[in-house]
Structure formats: structure tokens, C-alpha cells
Image (tube, rainbow, N blue to C red):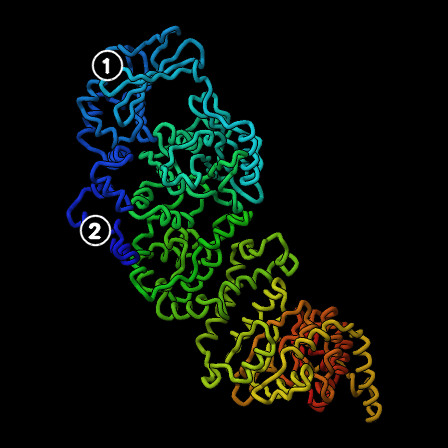
Amino acid sequence: VKQGLKLEPGDYEFRTLQEEIKAGATLEQMEYHWIDPNADQMLQQGLGPDVDDKQRALACIRADEAGLAEFYELFCPERYGYEKNAPCCEFQYPVKKHLVELSFRMNEAGLSKMGTDWLRRLKERLDSGEWLSHTPEGEAEGILTAVLVDQTRRIGLVYQQPGDDQYFQIFLNPDGTKADVMWSSAEKGEPELYTEEEMSAVEQHIKNTFGDFENVFHELVSPDIHVDICVVPPSEERDYYTLVTMGMGAHRMNVPEELAEYKLERAELAIALPPDWKLDGESMKEERWYWPIGLLKVLARLPISNDTWMGWGHTMDKQSPFAENTTLCAAILTGPQGTEEGGEVCTLPSGEEVNFYQVIPLYRDEMEYKLSSSAGVLLERLETVGFVVDPKRPDVTDLEDWEEDEAETDSNWVLDDARQHLERIRRKCLPVDEISAYNHMAIYLRWCMEQDLMSLEFLERCWDMVEEFRADPSGTDLRPFIRDSLGGQLFSALFDEEGAAFAGYYYGEADSPYFPSDIDNYALEYFGSEQYYSDKFREEACLFIPFDENYYQAMAKIMEKRFVNWQGQDFDEATLEPSDLAEAMMEYLNCGCTYFPSMTDDDPITAAYSYAKRDGVKEGFVPVLLRADDETLWECLILNSDPDSDGGDGYAFDPDKVAEYRKKMLAAPLQDGKAVLEGMVGQRKEEAEDDDMDWEEEVLGEMEGGYENRRFSSYWNSDTHMTYPLILAKIPVKNPWEIFAYLPFGGWNECPNTPELMAVAKYWFEQYGAAPAAMSHDELEFLLPAPVPGEKAMDAAAELYGFCPDVIDQGPEDATVGALADVLRQSTVWYFWWD
């Protein structure tokens, strides 16, 4: 109430409830209200069309123990196969040795308030046998088969006539006198049914929404509606059975007038069962396998028997377990699960709508939690355990103490919530077990537990699990623990001060480095580009990685690297904000850009680049790292793309001319990159000949003396041992070689011009997968997926020498093409520098 008034100050419902709590009102008194103030005032005066319905509903909240005991003493229902709260209370009662179904159309709470005197008179009439037979005028005699009693004490007597489907019903007033109403199968021999066109529309909707079906559980006896149950078998997209009613919507439910505009009168229900659920005829004789079908049938008829309606968030309470092997005992309705958008409504040819709802079985505590909070809050919790029936699933209310305590701490925040991952699994109908939604969360939690980064509160609350984990870390599956004990969430309060700080750095905002992005990177590495980007995984490849020790160990190495970097990281405070030059350069590029200040460890930079490289394939860009403080680079870019501007006046340039230059470069036919390189190598040979150098021995040499290079070096400041300020630019081009249309830094001294850069980069990408990745005004680095094979290294090194002679000519005295080749066969980064 306090929270409600905080969110909605002065709200009538919360204010009234607050006053009645203070006054010590009973639960029934507190429930005897409408939300609308005017409607509530009429209710309190005993006015309005729904007063009686409201009172009857309240009567079913809590049982009168004395009244219930008197009912048991009168009828001894336990002797006759009594089934209570299902949702009615029914048993076979002997009338002159003839068994009759005695059905009280209410739960035990309502039954306990029927009144002992009235129940005694009912029993006397039954025992006397006065109702045992009845002969309607002009018809055959009927034998009493059922006695139906509603909350208003009206009685329905159902009689069976000769013939399997011949019966009639007469209605009695509470005092036993006959009402002027009679129902006969001779007059109304058919239950409510869809028209042929309506049935066709509903059947097609079920197939479109839930899947094709061949097996149907046909109903043999249908006194009111004919409810068949369609059985949609498991498939690759949906690894579970879906049972869907077909026929419930033929009956128009008694929906309140104020909701008429929402077209809620018709409904069908669905329930999901595991793929190993037994649905054969023999197994269905056992309640442990049959109860979901029985539940659908009971729910389908509930609006008829109680003259009510059902919709989203409505619940049914059986108050006893559905079967011996489960304590599930209630159910809630929500929208269809694991289906595409639009599956919740079937539009009939007439324009009427049939609403489809998913049935989620509940435990007793969950049912009470819904009554004390709301359907929405409970359904949010249920998302963590999924919608497929599991008789032994965890109770989602078990975590209430955790969440309430944590909600009081402003500093606590959620790192990850499995609900979003489960939602994607269901929406995309991915063929994976829903426990996969917790894979990466379990990896993170395990690593933090192994590093002793957990809070004292976590250790105290979860000590049993912690002991089990410490005894066998690799053998303890933390996924069920996260799902069942942590509500499907990782939150900062689980960790100690250092652990929470690291989580904020690595698992907080989607920055770099970012744990979920590292998971995606590993998925790309594990499956390879072709599979990772295919439609097979629907952009959720990480959910398909086998959850095993190899997966954990691979991620543990990455996490250790991130942790060490975080502990030792330092920044140059003078560069924390982009300079005017950096701002101008990002404006010039006119694309997605991320600025990085000068730092001692480039882990955030390389992480961000790797994430961008992965995402660029799908989103259509190529990432490049640029020196953000390089005045000469700025001058080169402007000189090539906007030569009429010197770029010096406040870093001004003409955007239209820059755009025109890019368009021109991208539209121009590319030169033959191999031919360009051959020409450059030929020029180097001529220079060697002019210098009286032997090409084979002095320039090429032997393939030896090299080293491994797998890190960028162009952005490091050798004086400060920190990175220069950088920009990660997401250049909006499809192919790596096209980035030079946006970054035309060459055309001076021996540095190739833009057409040459594009042609050579295209050739190298096609030959080796090399992509331009980092640059300053006089440096350029390419990143490769793998080193150049040894047999191709000499030819590649000669090409690099032709492209950038300074890598050898300005290198050590013993530098040769052969030594460069020895570098290439070990390296995934190519480095160029022009003097």
C-alpha cells in the first residue's frame, strides 16, 4: 500500500485499503470494493448490477471452518470419492442405493457458507428419494444422475432417459419449489458449436500459431460445448508438446459490459508439455499423465458452469495437487508462449475474435503471491522457469526474501536477467533447452566464486551450495541455482566490494570490455564465420555453444585478462574528454565513433575493435582505429578530400565536397591490385639496381630472423608508454578496402594514393583476409585472421616491400625481405611506416 501510494499519491484504491487495514478490517471487507470511486460508493450502498456477484466471489476467499465441519458431518463426502476445489466440490452420493453425482458449483470456502440448516434440508430431500425419478409431460421417465447446487442455493436436477444421449434438467428454487425453467436434450440436443467457417478459421489459426497437428483428443460426451484437444507434437522449433483446446470459444462468456469493446467473449486455451510426456491411451489412464488434459477441460467449462469469463491473469485454484507426483494445484492464464506476434487472437469470418491463452500451472505459494501482489508480478517471476509444464519445477516465490532485501539497497543493480534471454528463445522458437539462457551467467558466477569475489551475505545465504561448489567446481552446475535461487538474475549484491566494482566495469554498461560481447566473440571463434552469421542460429549463436569445461576454461582466460587489465589500468586525465581536433575528426567521418583517452593498457581498445569487427559484418560497416590527436593526419584527409580548404580555421571543411569525394572514389573502377604491387616491386628492383645492390642476396635474403607480431603498435606513445587518444570509427562501407574513400591519408612521398590503397587492400583481403585496422598520418596496420602460410611468405613480403619500402629501407641494417617474410609467417598484424 505504501509503495502504491508512493507511485500514485491519493489513489482511491490504495487510500481505502490503507484506512481499512488501520481499522482492522477482514480480508473479505477489504476486498469488497471497486477501483472506481463512484462504482464503489454504489457497491457500499448495496446498489449496482454486480453486488450479488461480488458477494458470492468474496464468499469463496476463505473457508468458515465451523460451517465446513458441519458439511462433512452431514454428508461424509470422503466416503464417496470426494473431489474438492477442482474447481467445484463433487462426490457420488447414494440416493436409495442409486449413486448420484452431487456437485456443489463452488470451492470449499463457498460451500462452508451455504448454511447448516439449508444443507440439512437438502440432504433430507435426497435421502427421501423424492427426486430419484421424474417424467416430463409427453416424455419417457428419467432417472436422477446428478444434482447441481450453485452459490445462490438454486438446484439443478439432471435426469437420464432411455438412450445414451437423452437427458433433461429441471431447476429448483432454494426452498425446493420448481422454477419455471427446464432444459431437455430433446429441445436442445446439440452443444454450442462453431459454425463450419468458424471452425476452419480456428483450426488454421492453431496450425499457424502453434504448429501442425494430426492427433486430436475428441470429446465423446459434450453436454454444453464440444471441447476437442489438438496435440501439436514437438519439433525442431518447439521442443515440447502443445495441447490446444478447440471448441471452448463456441460459447460466448459473460464479460463485464465495461470490457465489451475488447472482444473478450470467446477464448481457447493452450498448455505446453515436455517432449517425453506420455500421451498414449494406456498412460492417460494414470492421473500423473492425464491431469493437464483434465485441467484444460475444466477450465474450458468454468465460464459456463459459473456464468463468468476468463482472460489474461485470471487464476483457477484446485486447492489440492493435480496428481500424486506434483504439488502444482492451481493455474494462471497468460498470452500464448513461444509463438510469433499475433498468435494471441484469431479473427473469425464474422469479425468476432477468439482469444488464445497459455495455461501455466501454479503452486499454492505462487497462487497466494498472485493474490497479494498482482498477476503481472507473478508472471514476470514465472518467466525464469519457462512455460513448459514441469511437475517438479522450482517455486518462483522462494526468492522473495532475496529480492525484497535487495530492493531496499539503492546501490544494488542487476547485471543480467535471464528473462530477456528466455524471451528471445521463445520468440525465435530456438531449438535449445531453456536452461541455455543461463549458460553465460553460470560461467561468470563460477569465475567470481573461484576468485573469492563473493559477498559475505551470499556466502551465508547460499552456504550449502557454496560447500558443494568448493568440493567440485567443475562438476557443480550453477545454472539451476541461478534460475531457482537467484530468480534468474545476477545482481551486484552477490559480490564483495571488489567483485561489484569489477562487475560494474565488465558486466555493467555495454561498453568495452563487456562480458556478453566476449561471449559472442567466443561463439564466433567456436562456430566460425559461416555458421555464426547464418540463419541457423538467428543471431543467438552463443546459446548453442556446448556448456562444458572447454567453454568455461576458454572464457576464464579472457576474464582473467580483463580482470588484470582493470586492476592495473590508468588514464591520462588530460585526455579524458575529446580535443577539438578529435571532435572535428569525428564530425568529418560522419559515422559511428567511440573516443578512447590515453591509457596504460589497450585492452578496452582491442576489445571494442573486436566487437565492432564482429558486428560490422551484420550491420554493414568496417571498424578502423585512428590517432585522435594527429594534426598531420587531419591535414592529409582534408588535402585529399577537400583541397580548397586548409582545414586549419577551427578545423573547418566542406561536408558536401567531402561527401562528393567519397562518392567519386567508391564509384571509380578499381585498379588491378596485383598489377599495382608488381609495378611497385619493379620500382624497388630498379632502385636496388641503381644502388648496385644484388636483389636476390642483399634485398631478398633468407627467410629467417623474424618475430611474431599480433598486436597493434601504431597507437602507442613510446615516451609515455601509454596509448595515444584514439577514435574507433565504424566506416559505413561494405568492403574493407573502401575505408580509404573515407580516410584518404596517402598520396605523399612513397605513401600510395587513394586508388592505389584501395586496389592493393582489395587484393590483400582476397588473398590473405587482411583488413586495414589502425592508422596515423604515417602508419598503417592490417589485421589478418591467420598468418601468411610459409610457402607464400616470401612473395607476400616482397609485395609489402614494394608497397612500403621504408619497412626495410628504414629498418635495421640487416633488414631484408626474407626477415620480413619470417615475420609474416608468424604474425596476424602487418605494420607499415612511411618516412
Of residues 189 and 109, the one nearer the viewer is 189
In the rendered view, tell whether residue 447 sits above or below residue 118: below
Front position among marks 2 and 1: 2
Give the x, y percent position of residue 163. Answer: 44, 10
In this view, which residue lies farthest toward the bottom? 691
Mark pair 2, 1: CA separation = 47 Å
Residue located 41% across and 52% down the image: 483
Asked if marks 2 and 1 touch (Cβ < 8 Å), the reply is no
Q: Residue at left 26%, top 30%?
A: 108
Q: Is residue 709 above or below residue 358?
A: below
Foreground pick, 794 / 75: 75
Label 2, on which residue? 18
Crowding at label 2, few (<14), some or many (≥20) Cα neighbours within 10 Å?
some
Image location of residue 740, percent across then percent down: 68, 76
Q: Secondary structure at mark 2?
A: helix
* Of the pair 192 and 432, the residue shown nearer to us: 192
Pinpoint residue 506: horizontal percent, then vertical percent: 46, 68
Residue identified by numbered label 1: 125
Q: Position of residue 653 (x, y in %)?
A: 62, 83
Question: From the image, which quarter does the C terminus lie in?
Answer: bottom right
In the rendered structure, the answer to whether residue 186 lies left or right of residue 51 reads: right
Which of the 4 image quadrants contains residue 673?
Answer: bottom right
